[in-house]
Image (cartoon, helix red, strand yellow):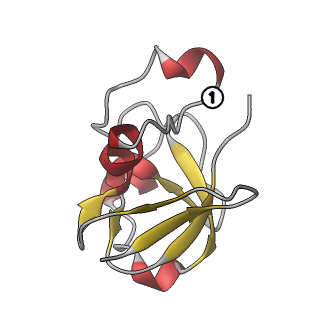
Amino acid sequence: MPIVRLHGSERSIEVGKGANLRRSLMLHGINPYAGVYRVLNCYGIGLCGTCWVEVIEGEENLSAPTRMESLNFRQPLKRGRRLACQTRVYGDCVIKLQTD
């Protein structure tokens, strides 16, 4: 099963192959949101654009970016950033969470 490691931390989680990244993080008590968006978000449907993570390693082990990611109206996603709610994990990766 794929391992998602959190950059700058000793923490890592094991997820099922093809698992949704946001859902997996939340199930392990890791909130991908920063600040007020920990409460005010779209709950994983890809509309708010606030669950982005930076992919440090293993981008090739993630699903291709979705249309919702390309249409993100809040801000264009920079290279190496993904919306956790739109990302599926197929292999090991290292991600960096947002900071408050």
- Image position, residue 100 (x, y; %): 74, 28
Q: Is residue 64 left or right of residue 4?
A: left
Spot occupied by residue 22 in the image (x, y as percentages of width and height): 38, 46
Q: Quadrant of residue 16?
A: bottom left
Above or below, comparing residue 67 to residue 71 in the picture: below
Q: Nearer the viewer, residue 37 or 49?
A: 37
- Up the image or down, 76 lies above or below 38; here it is below
Which residue is labeled 1 in the image?
34
Q: Residue 80's x, y, as percent?
A: 63, 67
What residue appears at the point 39 percent right and 66 percent down from the top-left corner? Answer: 65
Q: Amino acid at mark 1?
A: Ala
Point out the residue furthest to the front here: 10
> Residue placed at 44% from the left, 36% from the top?
29
**Relative depth, front residue between 83 and 39:** 39
Q: Quick check: 59 left or right of 84?
A: right
- Check disc 1 and report its element: helix, strand or loop: loop
**Vertically, is 42 above or below 20?**
above
**Left or right of residue 25, residue 32 in this image:** right
